[in-house]
Amino acid sequence: MLTAYDYHTAQVIDHAGIDSILVGDSLGMVMLGFETTLPVTMDMMLHHCKAVARGAQFALLIGDMPFMSYQVSAEEALHNAGQFLQHAGMDAVKLEGGRERARTIRALVAAGIPVMGHLGLTPQSVHQLGGFRTQGRSAQAAERLVEDALLLQDSGCFSVVLESVPHRLANLISEQLEIPTIGIGAGVGCDGQVLVTHDLLGLFDQFKPSFVKAYANLHQDMLSAFQNYQREVDLRQFPDEEHSFSMSDQAWDALQERLAK
Ligand code: KIV
């Protein structure tokens, strides 16, 4: 799984044969410049989900429910989750949290909405967690995560994201669950993996979690391209003949005659 927030990226991910695209609320940080995912709204999510849905043909599309779109009540969650499927072309939704979400997840699943869970480092709770930190490092915290994962499965989740947890723990949870786990900073024992596409492409240079592997350095490529463009424009090397339109001598001479009158 990879994240996408726009038509073109979704198209390329789809062509690459990636199974699933997450329109993550990471959108707030990598696309919109917020410091956390908390300011992301339903309107922002739906706008970007629609663009992704237009670009992807084959991948399973998952819309991330933003902060406060599912925490207030199961009824509000149902209404908001429904919009991802009904108006934004998504196949499923993802929401963060463990046992405290069980009732809401049951309500969504009962309404026919596939739900992906998200445990471990849940960025919407960044202030409660005291920062973007690895979760489940103590025996007690790890046990709670195992219980939560089983509860999410019992509540009807079709899959669970495990973010920033020790690889041994993610392995254990993956073995205990029948539904697939999708890891991010959770080691190789998960059933699948997800990365934020901007991190994978080396596009987002402000903050790089240690678990991220950049498969390209597009930030540097973009910087070089913009600088080369500026230099060529300043030197009048661009646009050259190849990138300009021509006019016949006959038409040019006729123009001169008209202007001379
Ligand atoms: O918002 C997001 O991109 C996510 C992934 C990091 C799993 O939740």
Image (cartoon, rainbow, N blue to C red):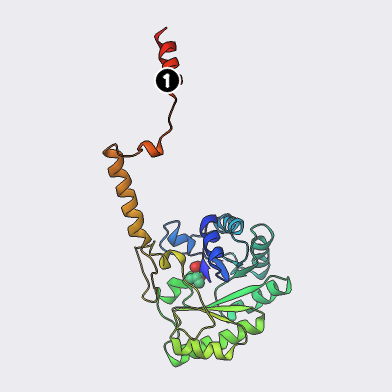
Of all residues, the one furthest to the bottom in this rendering is: 139
**Would you say residue 136 is visible in this rendering?**
yes
- Residue hosting label 1: 252
Q: How many marks?
A: 1
- Residue 176 location (% of width, % of height): 58, 91
* In the image: residue 132, left or right of residue 109: left
- Residue 239 location (% of width, % of height): 36, 38
* In the image: residue 164, left or right of residue 13: left
Residue 49's place in the image compared with 113, above or below, is above
Give the quarter of the image for residue 165.
Answer: bottom left
- Residue 12 location (% of width, % of height): 52, 61
Give the quarter of the image for residue 167.
Answer: bottom left
**Would you say residue 67 is visible in this rendering?**
no
Residue 74's place in the image compared with 219, above or below, is below
Which residue is at a point 34% across and 51% down the rendered structure image?
225
Q: Quadrant of the C terminus?
A: top left
Q: Nearer the viewer, residue 144 or 27?
A: 27
- Residue 207 location (% of width, % of height): 35, 66
Which residue is at a point 41% across and 17% down the rendered structure image?
253
Kindly state the secondary structure of the residue where label 1 is placed: helix
Residue 228's place in the image compared with 248, above or below, is below
Few, some or many residues within 10 Å of mark 1 (<14, 14–19, 20+): few
Identity of the amino acid at label 1? Trp
Residue 233's place in the image compared with 200, above or below, is above
Give the quarter of the image for residue 66.
Answer: bottom right
Whether the residue under disc 1 has CB within 8 Å of ligand 1: no
Of all residues, the one furthest to the top in this rendering is: 261
Q: Nearer the viewer, residue 13 or 130?
A: 13
